Image (cartoon, rainbow, N blue to C red):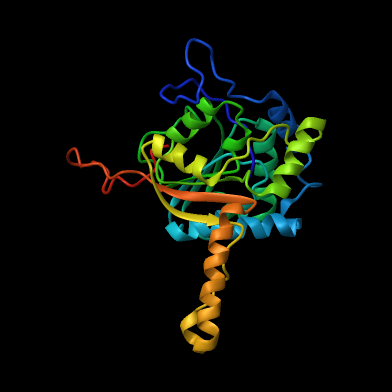
Amino acid sequence: MFAVVECDKSRGDPDMPQGGAKPESRSSAALASYEELGTQFDQHDPRDQYTYMSSKFRSDYTLMEHVGVDGKSVLNVGCSFPVDELYYARKVDRWVSVDLSPRSLEGAEAILNRELHPDLAKKFSLVVADACDLPFEDDTFDMSICMSTVDHIPSAEARQKAVDEMGHVVVTVPNRWCLPYAAGIWKMTREKTLHYGYAHLFSPREIRRIGLRAGLKPGFFASSIAPPDVWLPGYPVVIRWPARLTFRLLRFLGYFGRRVGYVFEKPVRPRSGPGAPGDGTHSSA
């Protein structure tokens, strides 16, 4: 999902601007695009885009299922069209979506109320909020997710701040090493025809480093290019060995997938006394 977030300044990275100037943390073009898009959700349903949904299943949802979402509370940083909310409505216990675009949240709420049974729709709360100044106490959520959101923040410093605000989190981003996709994004950016205004393309290594700087431990990696989910021991040896080699090649090619991401884990914190959070792995959002 896509969103625009507004962030404050942080310090500590040589690639980030230092001094008194506030980093460019908000793309006015992207916000304007999503405000307009929020009024047109009925005409632009991402579920109709097969390649987009296939990419989400291979990256976003693979990472979420790796952690597990059944009966959990989830914070979604960046909402726009509520495709993830609709998909996981049956599984989650509670879900809060934040976005800087009020019209996007209004459009998302209308879709959830129209397409979900009231018992499922009441699981969701939609909040206008800044991803770098989230209005929640530590350990409020079991999981934070951030799907193609930080790529809409122009400043490297502000992108870092957005990840700093999260805890046990799933982050996916568009990949600059998917060269055909990147060429299209760069062309539309030059021509000012990019429908969501602004996008920063990441490398897998870059998003991993952002998580590390936020004090998070990179865990499982996923990409829109991935081996099929096949139980190889059930096949004859003459099939298993060539398949294993092929799957190994596909895992390498995953670093060139259109969409890539990680599950990051928050370090376990010691209990500070009675009533302290149980295992310290909940989101700090």
Identified at 53% across, 12% down, the residue is 21
Report the side of 206 relative to 275 (left or right). Answer: right
Using the image as rendered, state which of residue 17 and residue 31 is in the foreground: 17
**Residue farthest top in this picture:** 20
Report the side of 43 relative to 34 (left or right). Answer: right
Q: x%, y% of residue 121?
A: 59, 51
Q: x%, y% of residue 70?
A: 45, 60
Q: Is residue 285 visible?
A: yes
**Residue farthest left in this picture:** 273
Report the side of 179 relative to 133 (left or right). Answer: right
Q: Is residue 130 visible?
A: no
Using the image as rendered, state which of residue 246 and residue 279 is in the foreground: 246
Using the image as rendered, state which of residue 56 and residue 70 is in the foreground: 56
Q: x%, y% of residue 182?
A: 70, 43
Q: Quadrant of residue 55?
A: bottom right
Identified at 62% across, 47% down, the residue is 177
Q: x%, y% of residue 186?
A: 74, 37
**Placement of 107 over or under 112, stated as above or below:** above
Identified at 43% across, 38% down, the residue is 166
Report the side of 3 relative to 283 (left or right). Answer: right
Which quarter of the rendering shows the N terminus?
A: top right
Which quarter of the rendering shows the C terminus?
A: top left
